[in-house]
Amino acid sequence: MAEIATIARPYAEALFKSTSGDLAGSQQWLDALAAVAGNAQLLQFASNPKVGDGEVYDVVTDVAKADLPEAGKNFLRAIIENGRLGALPEIASQFRAMKNAQGGSSDAVVYSAFPIAAQQVGEVAVALEKRFGRKLNVTVQEDPSLIGGIRVVVGDEVLDTSVKARLEQMKVALTA
């Protein structure tokens, strides 16, 4: 993975510097492109020597359905021409990390066994910001295997208050 990260870094830094006026907007279209570029079938199509760069560009933009500014179009063309389409998800990840570092925030993923209402997400976000001591960009994903409670991942930190985790703790205590 270090190779992909090494390849992605200059692209992410260049994009960050060139779009510093609209980082949030750039993050949106970059995430859309990265989601498309993460598809194995698309990467296989793009690596076919019979397929031209223009065709790959057209397929990616059609599937992404993102309203690309001129800088985004040029960026995507450069990625395709240099054969770096597979690095696009890592570029988006590194771009997000730079954007968060500039804004003093972090991404947080809240895994919940059940859907969480928007108001409750706001309340959880406030509590988590106090707990982690920084502003968080919270996203929620459902994970029925948790049984109940939530599991929060912020970078390399994990806060697990799920029923599943508590059952595991009880199992370890009883078998020790």
Image (cartoon, rainbow, N blue to C red):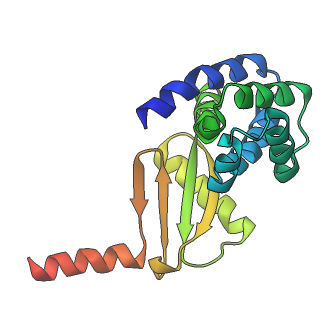
Residue 57 rendering spot, x and y as whole percentages: 82, 38
Residue 165 rendering spot, x and y as whole percentages: 35, 73
Q: Is residue 146 found left or right of 67 in the rendered image?
A: left
Kindly identify the residue that appears in the image at 78 percent across and 31 percent down: 76
Can you see residue 96? no
Residue farthest to the left, as pictured: 176
Residue 7: image quadrant is top right
Residue 89 rendering spot, x and y as whole percentages: 62, 42
Kindly identify the residue that appears in the image at 46 percent across and 77 percent down: 146
Q: Is residue 12 found left or right of 21 in the rendered image?
A: left
Q: Toward the viewer: 143 or 5?
A: 5
Kindly identify the residue that appears in the image at 28 percent across and 76 percent down: 168
Of the 4 image quadrants, the one containing the N terminus is top left
Residue farthest to the front, as pictured: 50
Q: Is residue 72 found left or right of 137 in the rendered image?
A: right
Residue 53: image quadrant is top right
Where 81 falls versus 109 (above or below)?
A: above
Can you see residue 81? yes
Kindly identify the residue that appears in the image at 87 percent across and 42 percent down: 58
Q: Toward the viewer: 154 or 36?
A: 36
Where 88 falls versus 166 (above or below)?
A: above
Q: Toward the viewer: 43 or 10?
A: 43
Where 62 falls versus 99 (above or below)?
A: below
Residue 67 rendering spot, x and y as whole percentages: 91, 42
Q: Is residue 6 found left or right of 53 in the rendered image?
A: left
Of the 4 image quadrants, the one containing the C terminus is bottom left
- How many numbered dots are placed on residues in this image? 0
